[in-house]
Amino acid sequence: MRSLLLAIGTMALLGGCSLREPMPADAQAPTLTPRTSTYRDLLALPRPKGPLVAAVYGFRDQTGQYKPNPASSFSTAVTQGAASMLVDAMQASGWFVVLEREGLQNVLTERKIIRASQAKPDVAPNIQAELPSLLAANIIMEGAIVAYETNVRSGGQGARYLGIGVSQEYRVDQVTVNLRAVDVRSGRVLSNVMTTKTIFSVGRSANVYKFIEFKELLEAEAGYTTNEPAQLCVLAAIESAVAHLIAQGVERRLWQTADGSSADHPALARYLGRPDQP
């Protein structure tokens, strides 16, 4: 009876003092990607006097980092879909008309198919009108994921008493992206920003290792680990870079807001290092 009571008390301690994350649930239905505060900052930016016609040809991974073994020696540590994230952030800001350039060959192929179909009788109603020319961009958005550092900072804490212990460990990684706006007419870099986002991982565990009676050992362990998704951190860094780039352009009078507000606008001042602005 004494052994049973001790085992029950130990498991209650493990469940109550350390492990507060829910157990894995059943499969959930797909949802929209969760967004961070940087996305809300993009929505809060003042509207432009006129949208900027911009093209995105790509947003490469220049880190050269791969996932550590034994996970995989061939899988990259960061997402390869950063160009799609950049397009999403630019459209969310409301400042850009984004032109499709990463899949430009697909657009050109489809236009050839339409022209070939128009030369035949009984043209489908949706392609009867003559194709207009493709839009040309005034700005090219260039950039890349330039750095991914692991174990920038790590540590933990724990305690053990009479064979009962709890512990917590954490690790901080870091991703850095570069974004620049290039004038198509002159090739001049109008604005250039670099943003950094930390990736936080934490693990908590509780364990018991205790002899209850002679040759009767009670051993129990429980724990969980939470890793901040790397792709969401890359997305947040890109969204922050877009907001910084827009704020720099307003400050340098490269483009203007619809209401004529200056870089002292609260949403812009926050990205120019002016938190005291009203």
Image (spheres, rainbow, N blue to C red):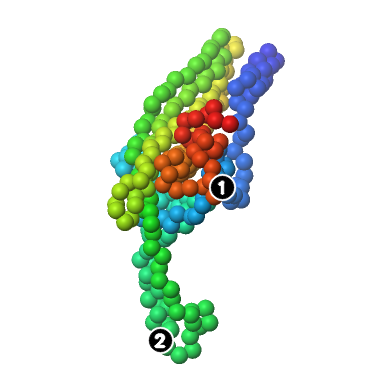
What residue sits 40% from the left and 74% below the top?
A: 111
Whether residue 142 sits left or right of residue 19 in the image: it is: left
The residue wearing badge 2 is: 119
The residue wearing badge 1 is: 259
- Labels 2 and 1: the sequence-earlier one: 2
Amino acid type at image mark 1: Asp
What residue sits 59% from the left and 11% below the top?
A: 213
Whether residue 168 sits left or right of residue 148 in the image: it is: right
Residue 73 at what x, y percent from top left?
32, 41
What residue sits 58% from the left and 31% below the top?
A: 278
Total numbered labels placed on residues in the image: 2
SS state under label 2: loop
In front of the other: 162 or 45: 45
In front of the other: 156 or 112: 112
Q: Which residue lies furthest to the front in this view?
A: 260
Residue 120 at what x, y percent from top left?
42, 88
Q: Quadrant of the N terminus?
A: top right
Above or below, 69 relative to 43: above
Residue 108 at what x, y percent from top left?
37, 70
- Label 2 and label 1: CA atoms lie apart by 48 Å
In front of the other: 57 or 245: 245
Above or below, 79 relative to 275: below
Residue 158 at what x, y percent from top left?
51, 15
Q: Which residue lies furthest to the bottom in this view?
A: 121
Whether residue 206 sits left or right of residue 175 in the image: it is: right
Q: Visible in this render: residue 164?
A: yes
What residue sits 62% from the left and 27% below the top?
A: 20
